[in-house]
């Protein structure tokens, strides 16, 4: 369904339309299920905040824009919606705008993602100029389905297309078959242009999905309400970058170079973010680093799928469904983790430092169980959802590395496998520090009856609350009596329970044919055994897959065990001063000094450029403008004198004009055509 | 093919409007609501009819021209082209806009029937221009409108400035008409016929005669479209005429000149294509560049609103001439879109000036300070119309200019200079439009003297709500109350007309495709149906 929004004189049409592609349908499920649960949860969580109309208005605008993004049928519309979700993200991160840290986090998120957006625009411009027109003339067929070519008005489920068709609409069928579609686009014989376009689009996705090196904004984005973190910065908006990569890999395709860069960035980010998650003391930031890391896994899967498609004589269809499967499961268990964290923060009055928590399991049984489910799912322990999606994703990457035979790919594969160990380690570090042990390390936490978003407008940190300081002894009363921290009411626990259930079963959902149809190229397999429908070309799994499954499971288990040894049962592991671990810890704690580097860059380079631009603006541009204005005004003043108000002078001007025209037509034109008249002989 | 009499329904309705108005005048019915209402109804019916003829979706039932006749070549001195019919929509919109908004004017002694009768006659002439397939028919149709508008400018008989404007308009008009007819007679001498369809053929007599004839037609029609240097009357006339007449001149009768220009020259440049096509292109292109530049440069210096709008109107004519000079279907479509946009922009803008004049705001640009706060709806509408005139995206003015410039770029060669000149001019024009926005929104209104804000003036301007006490704009704090006061002080019809102009500018600016499709289709048939 699309219509021409604006047609240009050269025949270019900008279209607007809606398109429910399988990937889009999957995203719709994710966005709206999580969206609904988060809005429900917000009813209690945000109840005591100021500015609720603004909160809900921005949340609804976000949901509308996110649905619009998923339903867009061309890049132009996609960009409009992409910008709109970015705007909502900015507004919601800065919801507690009176807090300077929230305001600056919002700015940071906006600016860093903007870098990606600019790259994305440039990439789309290249595609646009190479593809000719953004048109809906023919919907392209979907890989894996029969080669039905259907018209854009055809709403059939199997007929989908990101309406960014090649100039020759009839070439839709080969457009998406084995071999990258990007080869069928006319880049004028240029080999680097499609690579560049792909890399630029990757830049956009990296900005939105917080991939290295544009990852810095996402941890800071945790300044927003936890509900916003769960919805936008875990489940939906940040996944839009992965969605962009997936649909681009399907409808346009990436070149081999781009595919390998995507794989590399994804794999590197998955490990890199995991290490930072190990050192963070903030409950929400740990989960935020985990999000960055998991998004890295997804990007890696898209890259691996594209590598397989781009192999010479490739027999592989596009397998972006693997990345989307992880996106799908991740949305549920990550939203679960965030909402559980929100529940903890809510219960203990806004404290976010996990080193002050501990022993909360007795007080928050539902929350701690829900978070345990989320942590197990994230670590990839069967039968929780994360296991299945991560297993497929690791298998796919292994296949890509082995088939391509590139040592670099093996290296990145190894990084991502190490990431599995780290994932289990940091998330159970979090869980043990918060929930296990006897009592909170900061006893004042038990006295607060909660309901504190730490970022409550204008209020100081909770431990500065004189009331909290007075009651310093742990309350002996049972948590059930409501004086200490306790699980929230059903409005907040219901979403936790629903998400827990989803985190447990989402891994099995592809066994349903209707869900499996939404995941192109996904072969649902466990330890190398393929279940459900596994097409021959999509299957890239061999016996090694069973080994891989075992290895990743062992790594995850190992991570949990190490976490238990170090932080379990109320232990707190402090790195002794001067030990060999102190230096890496400080590096991790300072997030590899990325913020410092970026700040230094911003101060020196950007500010310098800004000063230069300011000078140019002041003296060159403004000067030119003023100069032009001055000239115009001068001309204008003298021109006004001609407008004398005397009618005979007007008539004289008419005659002057007539004479000029006639002279031009009768004398100048023929003369320029080498047939000059003598002044007195008109050829009447 | 036989032409059914119903095919002339729009023209018949305009003629009926004039005749009935004068009959009612004779019968002593001079109430504005009766006479103006009649005109509004008749123009609306005519508009429905032409929209039906264009097969615009919900109006197809109103079609009166058999579809076989449209774009099927001339029938005697007339022809039905989809291009002409589309321009009839533009003309009728302009007339309807002015007729409707004028319902909010005060009751004059004898002036109401004169105003509406002449408006109908002028509309008739414009509609006939759109049907012309013959040079004499075309020029006579132009004269019907011309003579009506000379008188229309002076219909307020006691206004000395209007009388002076009318006299200037008439004198220069007479001169231009004489030149036009002289040019036409030269063409007749060259071809032996006045049918426009021969203009693309090689004449039987000397080609110099054709060139001189066409040159004279450029001058005669250039007067109508206010091309520089034939524009000088326009500023004095727009300034001196009653505001609603200025609105009609800018929105309506100037478009007639543009259409006449297209009708004559789109055919005749084909003649030059075999020999020296570039000559006419250069002449028209130069005319376009000079017109928009002079219009913009002089608009910059104006201190009064109406003179500024008059010069801006001249520069807009320059943009429209680009399309004629480029002479491709896309370019002519661009001119059509720009013309449609200009009806809304200039019509609405002059109506806003008229509305402000009735509540005692002076004509100087500085007098408009703070109107954004006292008259939120109409000032916002005016702001939108100014932005559209400047060509800011998401307005129809942007679409028109964009289409014109894109067509010029696409046509390659020297036409690219036309696009560049147009762009530079657009950029320069933002300066004087933005100045008005600043004055309306960022400068606080100074306390006005009582004389300017007398309730009596507002009362006079407000026949529809005569019993309610007139209110001072901005006195009430509630938005609803302020809006109501604004509507009451400006008159319901005029307020609605201004707001509708802005609304159409925005709606068609965001989703212009229906208009673009119509214009493209019409321009395509116009060029391809030439002999």
Image: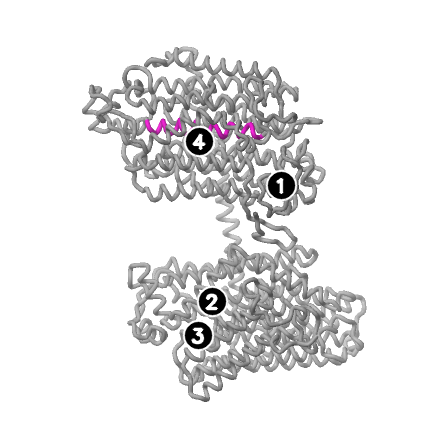
Q: Residue at x 56, y 26 (%)?
A: A300
The N terminus of chain B is located in which quarter? bottom right
Residue under label 3, please give it: B102
Q: Quadrant of the C terminus of chain B?
A: bottom right
Number of other residues with Cα within 10 Å of mark 2, as a class: few under 14, some 14 to 19, many 20 or more: many
Residue carrying label 4: A234
Q: Is residue B498 above or below residue A157?
A: below
Where residue A357 appears, as percent x and y from the top left, is 31, 21
* Residue B495 placement: quadrant: bottom left
- On the same chain, marks 4 and 1? The answer is yes
Q: Are marks 2 and 3 on the same chain?
A: yes
Queried whether the magenta region covers residue B277, the answer comes back as: no
Are the residues at dot 2 and dot 3 in contact (C-beta closer than 8 Å)? no
Q: Is residue B501 left or right of residue A284?
A: right
Q: Which residue is mark 2?
A: B348
Relative to B382, say whether A435 is above or below.
Answer: above
Q: Are the residues under badges 1 and 3 in a single subunit? A: no
Q: Which residue is mark 1?
A: A126
Chain containing the residue with disc 2? B
Part of the protein shown in magenta: A320-343
Residue B491's quadrant in the figure?
Answer: bottom left
- Principal SS element in the magenta part? helix
Q: Are marks 4 and 1 in contact (CB under 8 Å)?
A: no
Is residue A331 part of the magenta span, yes or no?
A: yes
């Amino acid at each position: 369904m699309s219509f021409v929004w604006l047609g240009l004189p050269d025949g270019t049409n900008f279209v607007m339309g809606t398109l429910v592609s399988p990937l889009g349908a999957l995203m719709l499920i994710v966005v709206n299920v999580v969206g609904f649960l988060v809005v429900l949860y917000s009813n209690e969580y945000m109840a005591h905040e100021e500015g609720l109309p603004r909160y809900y208005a921005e949340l609804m605008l976000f949901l509308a824009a996110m649905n619009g993004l998923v339903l867009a049928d061309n890049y132009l519309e996609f960009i409009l919606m992409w910008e709109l979700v970015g705007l909502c993200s900015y507004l919601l991160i800065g919801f507690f705008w009176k807090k300077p840290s929230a305001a600056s986090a919002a700015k940071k998120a906006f600016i860093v993602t903007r870098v990606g957006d600019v790259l994305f625009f440039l990439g789309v411009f290249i595609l646009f100029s190479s593809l000719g027109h953004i048109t809906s003339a023919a919907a392209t067929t979907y890989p894996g389905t029969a080669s039905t070519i259907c018209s854009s008005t055809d709403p059939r489920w199997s007929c989908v297309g990101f309406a960014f068709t090649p100039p020759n609409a009839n070439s839709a069928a080969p457009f998406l078959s084995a071999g990258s579609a990007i080869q069928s686009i006319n880049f004028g014989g240029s080999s680097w242009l499609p690579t560049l376009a792909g890399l630029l689009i990757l830049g956009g996705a990296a900005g939105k999905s917080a991939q290295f090196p544009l990852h810095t904004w996402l941890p800071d984005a945790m300044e927003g309400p936890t509900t916003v973190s769960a919805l936008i910065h875990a489940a939906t908006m940040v996944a839009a970058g992965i969605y962009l990569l997936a649909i681009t890999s399907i409808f346009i395709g990436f070149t081999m170079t781009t595919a390998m860069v995507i794989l590399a960035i994804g794999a590197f980010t998955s490990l890199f973010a995991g290490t930072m998650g190990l050192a963070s003391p903030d409950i929400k930031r740990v989960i935020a680093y985990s999000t960055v890391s998991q998004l890295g896994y997804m990007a890696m899967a898209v890259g691996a799928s594209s590598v397989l498609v781009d192999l010479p004589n490739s027999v592989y269809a596009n397998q972006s469904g693997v990345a989307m499967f992880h996106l799908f499961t991740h949305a549920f268990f990550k939203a679960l983790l965030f909402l559980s964290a929100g529940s903890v923060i809510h219960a203990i009055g806004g404290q976010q430092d996990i080193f002050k928590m501990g022993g909360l399991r007795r007080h928050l049984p539902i929350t701690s169980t829900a978070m345990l489910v989320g942590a197990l799912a994230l670590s990839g322990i069967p039968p929780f959802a994360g296991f299945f999606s991560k297993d497929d994703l690791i298998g796919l990457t292994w296949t890509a590395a082995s088939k391509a035979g590139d040592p670099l790919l093996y290296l990145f594969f190894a990084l991502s496998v190490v990431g599995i160990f780290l994932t289990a380690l940091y998330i159970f570090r979090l869980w043990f520090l918060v929930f296990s042990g006897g009592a909170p390390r900061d006893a004042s936490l038990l006295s607060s009856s909660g309901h504190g978003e730490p970022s409550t407008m204008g209020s100081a940190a909770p431990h500065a609350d004189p009331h909290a300081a007075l009651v310093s002894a742990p309350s002996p009363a049972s948590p059930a009596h409501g004086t200490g921290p306790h699980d929230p009411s059903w409005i907040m626990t219901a979403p936790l329970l629903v998400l827990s259930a989803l985190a447990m079963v989402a891994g099995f959902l592809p066994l349903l044919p209707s869900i499996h149809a939404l995941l192109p190229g996904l072969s649902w397999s466990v330890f190398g055994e393929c279940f459900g429908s596994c097409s021959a070309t999509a299957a890239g799994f061999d016996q090694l897959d069973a080994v891989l499954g075992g290895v990743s499971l062992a790594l995850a288990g190992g991570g949990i065990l190490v976490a238990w040894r170090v932080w379990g049962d109320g232990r707190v592991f402090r790195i002794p001063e001067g030990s060999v671990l102190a230096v890496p810890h400080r590096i991790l704690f300072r997030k590899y000094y990325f913020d410092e580097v970026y700040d230094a860059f911003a101060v020196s380079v950007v500010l310098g450029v800004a000063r230069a631009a300011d000078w140019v603006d002041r003296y060159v541009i403004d000067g030119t403008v003023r100069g032009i204005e001055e000239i115009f005004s001068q001309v204008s003043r003298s021109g006004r004198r001609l407008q004398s108000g005397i009618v005979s002078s007007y008539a004289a001007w008419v005659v002057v004009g007539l004479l000029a025209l006639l002279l031009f037509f009768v004398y100048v034109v023929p003369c320029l055509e080498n047939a000059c008249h003598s002044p007195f002989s008109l050829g009447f | 093919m036989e032409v059914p009499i119903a095919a002339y329904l729009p023209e018949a309705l305009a003629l009926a409007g004039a005749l009935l108005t004068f009959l009612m005048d004779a019968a002593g019915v001079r109430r504005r609501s009766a006479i103006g209402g009649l005109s509004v109804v008749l123009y609306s019916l005519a508009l429905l009819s032409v929209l039906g003829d264009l097969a615009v979706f919900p109006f197809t039932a109103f079609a009166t021209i058999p579809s076989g006749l449209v774009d099927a070549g001339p029938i005697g001195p007339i022809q039905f082209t989809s291009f002409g019919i589309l321009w009839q929509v533009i003309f009728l919109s302009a007339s309807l806009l002015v007729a409707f908004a004028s319902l909010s004017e005060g009751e004059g002694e004898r002036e109401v029937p004169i105003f509406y009768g002449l408006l109908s006659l002028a509309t008739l002439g414009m509609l006939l221009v759109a049907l012309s397939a013959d040079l004499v028919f075309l020029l006579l149709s132009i004269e019907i409108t011309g003579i009506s508008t000379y008188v229309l400018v002076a219909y307020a008989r006691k206004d000395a400035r209007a009388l002076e404007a009318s006299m200037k308009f008439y004198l220069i008009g007479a001169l231009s008409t004489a030149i036009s007819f002289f040019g036409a007679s030269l063409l007749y001498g060259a071809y032996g016929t006045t049918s426009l369809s021969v203009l693309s053929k090689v004449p039987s007599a000397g080609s110099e005669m054709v060139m001189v004839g066409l040159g004279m037609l450029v001058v005669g029609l250039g007067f109508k479209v206010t091309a520089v240097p034939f524009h000088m009357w326009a500023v004095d006339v727009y300034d001196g005429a009653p505001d609603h007449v200025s609105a009609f001149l800018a929105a309506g009768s100037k478009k007639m000149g543009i259409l006449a220009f297209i009708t004559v020259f789109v055919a005749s440049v084909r003649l030059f294509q075999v020999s020296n096509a570039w000559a006419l292109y250069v002449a028209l292109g130069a005319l376009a560049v000079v017109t928009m530049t002079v219009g913009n440069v002089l608009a910059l210096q104006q201190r009064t609103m109406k003179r500024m709008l008059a010069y801006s109107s001249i520069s807009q004519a320059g943009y429209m001439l680009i399309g004629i000079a480029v002479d491709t279907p896309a370019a002519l479509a661009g001119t059509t879109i720009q013309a449609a946009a200009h009806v809304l922009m200039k019509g609405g803008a002059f109506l806003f000036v008229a509305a402000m004049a009735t509540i005692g705001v002076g004509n100087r640009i500085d007098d408009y300070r703070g109107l954004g706060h006292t008259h939120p709806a109409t000032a916002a509408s005016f702001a939108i119309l100014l932005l559209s005139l400047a060509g800011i995206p998401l307005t129809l003015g942007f679409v028109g200019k964009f289409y014109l410039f894109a067509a010029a770029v696409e046509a390659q060669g020297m036409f690219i200079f036309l696009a560049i000149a147009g762009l530079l001019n657009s950029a320069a024009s933002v300066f004087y439009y933005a100045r008005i926005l600043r004055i309306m929104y960022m400068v606080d209104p100074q306390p006005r003297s009582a004389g300017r804000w007398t309730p009596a003036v507002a009362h006079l301007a407000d026949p529809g709500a005569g019993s309610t006490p007139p209110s001072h704009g901005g006195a009430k704090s509630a938005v609803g109350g302020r809006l109501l006061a604004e509507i009451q002080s400006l008159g319901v019809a005029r307020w609605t007309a201004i707001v509708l102009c802005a609304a159409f500018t925005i709606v068609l600016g965001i989703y212009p495709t229906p208009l673009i499709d119509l214009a493209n289709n019409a321009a395509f048939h116009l060029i391809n149906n030439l002999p």
